[in-house]
């Protein structure tokens, strides 16, 4: 795959799926989340930008892991924070 628009998305050969459908950080504090995203580098499943705590975005910036996949059933897309690129898979 070389048409995804950024090298980070090109590096994803098989998309990591969430092990559990919950935000690992929100469950610690009892916070609510809206949608879930799975980090494609370490597999962490965290909450989206519509959620109050935006853990997936915080994780991407803190860890330098730029690529997430939607962890929502039926959604098949990847997003690179570094380049702002989105692709379906
Ligand atoms: Zn990228
Ligand atoms: Zn969260
Ligand atoms: Zn990560």
Image: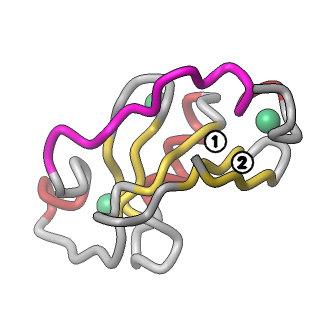
Q: Nearer the viewer, residue 43 or 75?
A: 75
Q: Nearer the viewer, residue 70 or 29?
A: 70
Q: Quadrant location of residue 19? A: top left
Determine whether label 1 and label 2 are within 8 Å by CB: yes
Side of 21 relative to 45 (left or right): left
Give coordinates of residue 74: x percent, y percent. Answer: 35, 66
User: Where ligand 2 lies, by quadrant?
Assistant: bottom left
Q: Quadrant location of residue 15? A: top left
Q: Quadrant location of residue 7? A: top right
Tell me what residue is drawn at x 53 percent, y 50 percent: 58
Q: Regarding mark 2 in the picture, which secondary structure is present there?
A: loop
Give coordinates of residue 86: x percent, y percent. Answer: 72, 55
User: Which of disc 2 and disc 1 is earlier in sequence?
Assistant: 1
Give coordinates of residue 52: x percent, y percent. Answer: 40, 78
Q: Residues within 10 Å of mark 2 (few under 14, many from 20)?
A: some
> Vertically, is 79 above or below 51?
above
**Residue on which disc 1 sits:** 61
Q: Which residues are magenta?
A: 9-20
Q: Does the stretch in magenta take in 16?
A: yes
* Ligand 1 within 8 angstroms of badge 2 C-beta: yes
* Ligand 3 within 8 angstroms of badge 1 C-beta: no
**Residue on which disc 2 sits:** 81
Mark 1 and mark 2: span between their CA atoms? 8 Å
Give coordinates of residue 50: x percent, y percent. Answer: 48, 80
> Vertically, is 21 above or below 30?
above
């Amino acid at each position: 795959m070389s048409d995804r628009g950024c090298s980070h998305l090109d590096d994803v050969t098989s998309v990591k799926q969430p092990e559990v459908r919950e935000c690992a950080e929100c469950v610690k504090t009892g916070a609510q989340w809206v949608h879930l995203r799975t980090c494609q580098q370490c597999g962490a499943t965290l909450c989206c930008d519509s959620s109050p705590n935006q853990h997936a975005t915080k994780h991407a910036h803190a860890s330098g892991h730029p690529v997430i996949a939607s962890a929502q059933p039926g959604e098949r897309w990847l997003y690179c924070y570094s380049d702002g690129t989105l692709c379906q898979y």
